[in-house]
Amino acid sequence: MRLKSFTAPTMAEAMELVRIELGDEAIIVSTQRAAGSKGVRITAALEPADADMAVAELLEESSASSAAETIKTALEPHNLPPRLAERLVNAARTSEINDPTLACAAALEAGFAFAPLPEHSAPRPFMLVGPPGSGKSIAAAKLAARSVLRQRQVGIITCDNMRAGAVEQLAAFTRIMEIELVKARGPDSLRRAVENATGMHDLILIDSPGLNPFKQSDLDYLQAMIEAADVEPLLVMAAGGDPLEAAEIAEAFATVGATRLFTTRLDTTRRLGSMLAAAEAGQLALCDVSASPHVASGLSPISAMSLARLLLPQPPEPEPQNDETFWTDEAPVS
C-alpha cells in the first residue's frame, strides 16, 4: 500500500502510529485536523518515490476539486435544476481535469448528446415544432439561408395557418433567397407537399404552427402531421425561460418524436438553465443555436466545448497595444 492515513488525539500519538505501522523510513505526505476537530490526521507513505507520487496525486486531486468548485459557482446564476447542476459538478470532478472549461466540457459530453443539423443535405425533411413565439419561422429562414449560401437547393413548406402574418413573414425571407414557399393545411396537404418536393431539394424545412404542449388535441394534430409526411420533428425553444417549465415542454414534444433541441435568442439571455433542463428532460440532443435577430448570421452548431464557454465566464481578451510607435529596422520613430 502506497499511502496510509492515521488519526489520533495528538500529533505525537499520530506520529507514533506512523512509526509503528510503516517504520522509521515513512515519509509524511500531509497533516490536517481530523473531521469534527477530533485530533489530527496524518497521511504517510513508505517509500520516497511513493511519497513523491502521493504528493503529485494530492495536488492533482486538489486542482480537480478546485475546477469542480469553479464550475459549481459558475452554474449557480444559470438556474439549473439542483439535481442537474450537482450531476454536472460531480461529472467534472470525476473527470480529474484541472482546467474548469475543459472539465465542464467533459461533464457536458458525458451528460448530453450533441447532434448538429446538416448544412448540405438530409434524408428526411425537418419540421420545426414548438410552443408559440419560440422563433420557429426565423429558425427556418436561418437554416435555409445557411444552406443557400453553400449553394444547396432548399425547399420550405409552411403549415402555420394559425398565427396572423406568419406566412407573410416567412414569405418575405424566401423571396429574398429566391425560394418558393409552399403552403400546406393539415396532414394530407403536408404529405402531398413533401412528396412533390422529395428529390428536388437537398434540404426540406417545414414551419409548423405554435402549439400548446399541454393540450392533448394540439399534440394529436402535430403527431398526425409528422406521421403523414414522415418528417423529423425538431424542437425549437427560446433560451431564458423557466427551467422547470422548459423541461415539461420538452417532455411533451418528445412524445411526438422530437429528438433534437434548437435553441433561439441566445443573444438576449444570460441564463441557460432552461436549455439544459429541456434537453435533459426530453432526452434531446443539442444541435444548433441562434444568437442574432438577423437571418444571415448568428446561427451555429453547439458542442460541449462551446456550451462550456457559454456557461463559464471567460477571461477577457488582452487589449492590443497601441503606443503610436512604428518600428523600422534601425530605430523606433513616432
Image (cartoon, grey):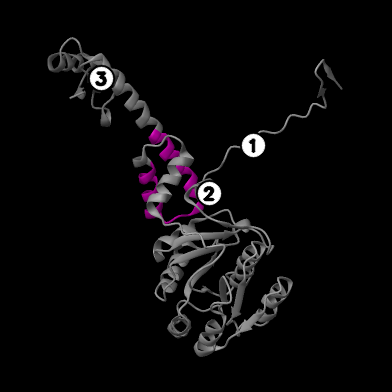
Disc marking residue 305 = none
Q: State the residue position of label 2.
A: 306
From this view, report whether residue 328 is shown above or below residue 206: above
Distance of label 3 from label 1 (alpha carbons): 41 Å
The foreground one among 307 and 233 is 233
Q: CA distance from mark 3 to mark 2?
A: 39 Å
Quarter of the image with the N terminus is top left
* Amino acid type assigned to the residue bearing label 3 in the image: Asp
Q: As drawn, which residue projects farthest toward the front?
A: 199
Q: Which residues are magenta?
A: 64-92
Residue 314 visible to the viewer: yes
Q: Quadrant of the C terminus?
A: top right
* CA neighbours of label 1 inside 10 A, class few (<14), some (14 to 19), many (20+): few
At horizontal 43% and vertical 63% (from top left) the residue drawn is 284
Q: Position of residue 17 (x, y in %)?
A: 15, 17
Residue density around tag 2, few if under 14, some if 14–19, many if 20 or more, within 10 Å: few
In the rendered view, would you say 193 is above or below 8? Answer: below
- Please tell me which of labels 1 and 2 falls first in the chain: 2
Element under label 3? helix
Please name the amino acid that badge 2 sits on: Ser
Q: Earlier in the sequence, mark 3 or mark 2?
A: 3
Name the residue beneath numbered marker 1.
317
Q: Which residue is mark 3?
A: 50
Q: Is residue 65 magenta?
A: yes
> Which label lies toward us, 1 or 2?
2
Q: Look at the magenta stretch and give its main secondary structure.
A: helix
Mark sitting earlier along the chain (3/1): 3
> Where in the figure is residue 136, as x and y percent of width and height?
58, 71
The location of residue 329, given as percent across then percent down, is 80, 18
